[in-house]
Image (tube, grey):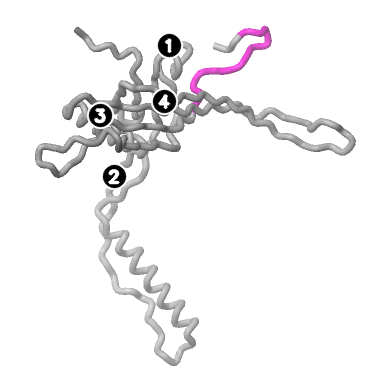
Amino acid sequence: MEEDKRFNIFITHVPTGESLDFEPYIENFTDNYKSDWKTETVIGRMDNISTFIRTGRIISLSFNVVSDNKKDACLNYNKSTKLSNFLYPVYKQIKTAQKQKAKVANPIPNETVKPTVRNFYNASALATTLEQNLSLRDEVSIMSAPPIIKIKFSNLISDRYNDSGLYGYLDAFNFQPDKDLGYFLSDDDNVIIPKAYNVNFTFNVIHVDPRGWTIDNKLRS
């Protein structure tokens, strides 16, 4: 019989396509909408002049993950580790041209030169050396994609058009083992696996669908 995952929390790391899901015991769910307005105070006017800027959405979710046995506990613990990795971006390796290391051209003045001038030459020599060492690297890493996340949780975190998840990013993720329920020991007794733990995070929604109203009083689609 296929496992029912309708009420699981599905999380995808969009740049890589890596995904996971939790079977949660929900502790807290908060869906916050906040409109930002620019206000200006005018002499003699009782109310501010207010100009609409934007409406943002932030979802806060806290849930417990409980394991019945060591095997499930290991799987669930690995999911929490994988989720923490979802907060990191994707990097691209760029090959660099090798350069011949050269001697520093700036001579360091002798002791008769004023200390401020000597310090300047010392700093210049150090900067030149660091630049040369950087040029000698075979490759460097640059960020190629930010850690965008997609989350789906029943109808509470869901796209209103196609019943898929919402896009956004996590600016907080907390993992807290339940010390009262204790831990499993790995087979070699070198690793402890929590029997249950709490996850809570803050999810900033990125609007990819048109929101608002049309001039004939219909929702935009």
Badges 4 and 3: C-beta atoms under 8 Å apart? no
Q: Nearer the viewer, residue 93 or 213?
A: 213
Q: Secondary structure at mark 2?
A: strand
Q: Secondary structure at mark 1?
A: loop
The residue stretch that appears in magenta: 205-218
Q: Secondary structure at mark 3?
A: helix
Q: Nearer the viewer, residue 34 or 4?
A: 4
- CA–CA distance between discs 4 and 3? 17 Å
Chain-order first, disc 3 or disc 1 = 3
Which quadrant would residue 55 be assigned to in this image? top right
Q: Which mark is residue 162?
A: 1
Report which residue position mark 3 lands on.
Answer: 76
Residue 162 appears at what percent x and percent y? 43, 11
Residue 220 appears at what percent x and percent y? 58, 12
Badges 2 and 3: C-beta atoms under 8 Å apart? no
Report which residue position mark 4 lands on.
Answer: 27
